[in-house]
């Protein structure tokens, strides 16, 4: 089948109907492959049968004196501060990854937060902005006030420039809750970290990175191997491959994040999946 020339505005673009048809079929094919893998292999793993009575206090339920930091599998969310982002029905559908507030996510047990901030100190997802970052920090402090043993990993990264003095702003706002950057943390029990309860990873785009021993953690302590794809099996296989190249958790001096998320693409708008 030949290429079709299509005029979009003043531009003329080439569209290959065969290639377009193949792209439309890729996501459902990969979804079916994952369903077959689940059916044949199951989804159980050591510890997967644990069901905390209260998700809000699941670390307390494990026993802070019994669990070391490197033994914890931390549930978290991607683009955590995007509830209510942008303009409803206009820009929000392209930028919203979470419907719950940061506090509500913490209360359901998600204790790794991924927060993006622009130069004006508003949360963002790419160019789309939301509420001031103070809302996030207020939600974190509310959760800390209502619990006693839960540790939070709070990643703060900037897009399109760093807010002036933002590192000191974080220290001033979170104060005595902050756990100092220290490789020995990974071998400590949760109880040994208390009463400090926030590991704040600061990833500026231009400013100086946090110093060893300081109250903020540098980017290398929270790693991932993100690939930008809309194909769920491709994403899953990439995550397994990347995870296998990391050392065992008992020897790892960083947290490794596995994000099983996919990103919709303009040439393949297939329903019921998205960046999450």
Image: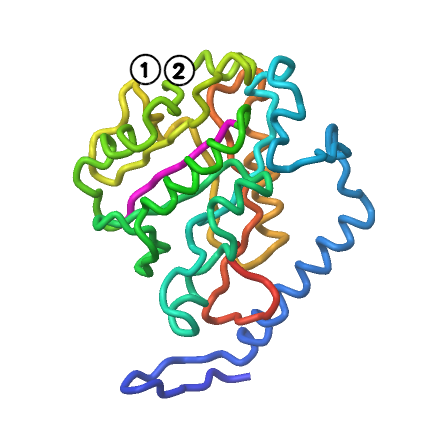
Task: Identify residue for label 1.
Answer: 213
First in residue order: circle 1 vs circle 2: 2
25 vs 220: above or below: below
- Which quadrant of the figure contains the N terminus? bottom right
Query: Residue at 55% across / 18% down in the picture?
Result: 190
Q: Residue at x 62, y 45 (%)?
A: 237
Q: Is residue 58 magenta?
A: no
Q: Is residue 206 left or right of residue 124?
A: left
Dominant secondary structure, magenta: strand
Q: Would you identify the image quadrant in which residue 42 lies?
A: top right
Report which quarter residue 248 is drawn in. top right
User: Is 192 on the left-hand or right-hand side of 56?
Assistant: left
Q: Is residue 55 left or right of residue 156?
A: right
Seen from the viewer's position, the closer of residues 247 and 151 is 151
What's drawn in magenta, residue-wise?
A: 151-159
Closer-to-camera residue (265/215): 215
Point 59% across, 62% down: residue: 273
Q: Is residue 88 above or below residue 216?
A: below
Label 1 crowd bin: few (<14), some (14–19), many (20+), radius 10 Å: few
Q: Position of residue 15 (x, y in %)?
A: 45, 80
Q: Are marks 1 and 2 in contact (CB under 8 Å)?
A: yes
Percent x, y of residue 264: 50, 63
Give SS at disc 1.
loop
Question: In 3D space, how far apart are the residues under numbered discs 1 and 2 (Cα atoms)?
Answer: 6 Å
Q: Does residue 260 lie above or below 215 as drawn? A: below
Crowd around label 2: few <14 · some 14–19 · many ≥20 (10 Å): some
User: What residue is shown with label 2?
Assistant: 182
């Amino acid at each position: 089948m030949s290429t079709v020339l299509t005029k979009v505005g003043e531009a003329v673009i080439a569209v290959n109907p065969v290639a377009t048809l193949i792209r439309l079929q890729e996501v459902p094919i990969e979804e079916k492959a994952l369903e077959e893998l689940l059916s044949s292999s199951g989804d159980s793993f050591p510890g997967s049968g644990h069901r905390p009575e209260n998700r809000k206090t699941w670390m307390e339920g494990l026993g802070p004196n019994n669990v070391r930091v490197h033994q914890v599998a931390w549930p978290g969310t991607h683009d955590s501060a995007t509830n209510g982002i942008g303009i409803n029905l206009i820009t929000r559908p392209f930028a919203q990854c979470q419907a719950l507030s940061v506090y509500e996510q913490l209360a359901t047990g998600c204790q790794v937060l991924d927060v993006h901030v622009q130069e004006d100190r508003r949360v963002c997802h790419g160019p789309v902005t939301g509420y001031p970052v103070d809302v996030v920090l207020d939600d974190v402090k509310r959760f800390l006030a209502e619990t006693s043993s839960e540790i939070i990993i709070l990643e703060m990264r900037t897009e399109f420039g760093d807010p002036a003095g933002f590192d000191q702003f974080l220290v001033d706002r979170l104060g005595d809750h902050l756990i100092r950057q220290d490789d020995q943390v990974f071998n400590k029990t949760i109880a040994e970290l208390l009463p400090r309860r926030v590991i704040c990873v600061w990833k500026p785009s231009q400013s100086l990175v946090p110093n060893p021993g300081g109250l903020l953690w540098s980017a290398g302590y929270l790693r991932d191997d993100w690939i930008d794809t809309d194909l769920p099996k491709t994403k899953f296989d990439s995550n397994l491959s990347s995870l296998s190249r990391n050392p065992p958790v008992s020897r790892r001096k960083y947290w490794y994040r596995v994000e099983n998320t996919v990103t919709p693409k303009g040439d393949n708008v297939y329903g019921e999946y998205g960046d999450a």
